[in-house]
Amino acid sequence: MAMRQDLLARRGALRRIAGTLLAPMAGTASAIVLAEPADRFPSRPVTLWVPWAAGGATDLTMRLLAEIAARHLGQKVLIENRGGAGGTLVMPVLQQAAPDGYTIAQMPQPVFRAPWVQKVLWDPIRDTTPIIQISGVTFGIVVPVSSPVRTLEDLFDWAQAHPGELTVATNGTGTTPHLVMDELFGRRNLQWVHVPYKGVAQQMIAVSAGQVMAGVTSNGFAPFVDGGQLRLLATFGDHRTKRWPQVPTLKELGHGIVAMSPYGLAGPRGLPRAVVNTLHDAFKAAMFDPQHVAELAKYDQELAYLGPEDYARSMRETYAAERRAVEKLGLAKGSS
C-alpha cells in the first residue's frame, strides 16, 4: 500500500514538472496561431458590416463591391446588415472587434455626427482605422406622383396651411436628411412630423403608397422616380444631377445647403498597415471595376476615391465640421 502511494506521488510530481516545462511551448504555439503573418491575410472570409437594412441602394452597391473585392482577396467578403440608429450601429461592432482585418464596416456620415448630439461609448476617429473612401450619395426630397405638391415651395405652403400634419419620412433619426429637413422647416417656423425608417426600401414604399406625405433619403429613391411612382422636388448636391437635370438643388433654390455624405470603409483601431494595404488594394480595384461604376450610376453616384491617409484626414475634418453644424442648429449635447 505504501509503495502504491509513493508511486502515485512520483507520477504526480512528474506531471507537474512536465506541465511546467511545456507551458512556455504551449504559449508559443498559441501565439503563433493568433498572430497570423501579414502575408497570409486573408486566410478566411472577411465580414463587411453595412449599417442599413438589406435591399436598399447602399446595401445593393456594397454587396456588389464585396463580391468583386473577394475576387482580388481570394476569400469571400460576407455582408452583415445592422440597420437602425441612423446608421451608427456599426461603431460598437468595430470598437469590440479584433484588429485582424476580418471585421470591417462602411462608415456613413451619421457616425461623425452622433457623438456631438448624444452620449455614445465610441469615437469614430479613435476607434477606427481608415481603409478607403468610395463614393458619396445623392439626397433628394420626394412625394407620391399623385400628390398635389409639385415644388419644394408647395411643400412649405402645405405645412404652413396644415400645422403639425405634414409627415416626412427619413432614413433615420440624426441622419443628414433629418437634419436638413429640421433646418429647412425650422427657418420658417413650420411644424412637421418626422417618421424615421431603418431601411430606404421600406421608406420609399411607404411614401409611394401614401402612408407618409413626403420622403427624404439618399439614392434609393431613384428607381421609384424613374418608375413614375415618386416625384423628385429637389436634390442636395452642389449642382444638378445628370440623371434628373430638370430638378433644382437646395443651393440654387436659395437655401445654401449642399450635402453628399461621402462614405468609405474602416476597420477596428490598430489594424496593421500590411492588412490595411491588402484591403485597400482589393477594394480600390473593386470600386473602379466597370460593373461597380455602372451600379453606382443607377443611383446617380460617382466615385470619390481617397486612400488611407487622405481618408483619415477627411474623417477628422468631417468630425470637426459635424460639431460645428450641430452647434449651429442647437442640437449639441447640453443645448437648451
Image (cartoon, rainbow, N blue to C red):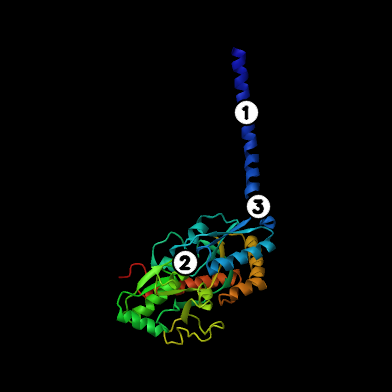
Task: Name the outermost residue toward the top.
Answer: 1
The image quadrant of residue 113 is bottom left
Q: Is residue 131 visible?
A: no
Q: Is residue 13 above or below residue 80?
A: above
Q: Amino acid at mark 3?
A: Glu
Q: Which residue is mark 3?
A: 36
Q: Is residue 63 above or below residue 257?
A: above
Tell whether 69 sits left or right of 199: right
Q: Pointer 1 and pointer 2: residues touching (CB < 8 Å)?
A: no
Packing grade of label 3 (10 A; few <14, some 14-19, many >=20) is: few
Tell me how far mark 1 sits from mark 2, CA to CA: 64 Å
Q: Which residue is mark 2?
A: 202
**Depth check: 250 or 270 in front?**
250
| x 62%, y 66%: residue | 64
Q: In the image, residue 4 lies at what x, y percent?
A: 61, 15
Task: Name the outermost residue toward the front.
Answer: 146
Of the numbered discs in the image, which one, if any, rests on residue 68? Answer: none
- If the image is split into quadrants, where does the C terminus sit? bottom left
**Element on which disc 1 rests:** helix
Tell me how far mark 3 sits from mark 1, CA to CA: 31 Å
Q: In the image, residue 237 lies at what x, y percent?
A: 50, 81
| x 59%, y 13%: residue | 2
Q: Amino acid at mark 1?
A: Arg
- If the image is split into quadrants, where does the N terminus sit? top right
Q: Which residue is mark 1?
A: 15
Q: In the image, residue 192 lies at what x, y percent?
A: 34, 74
Q: Amino acid at mark 2?
A: Gln
Q: Is residue 53 visible?
A: yes
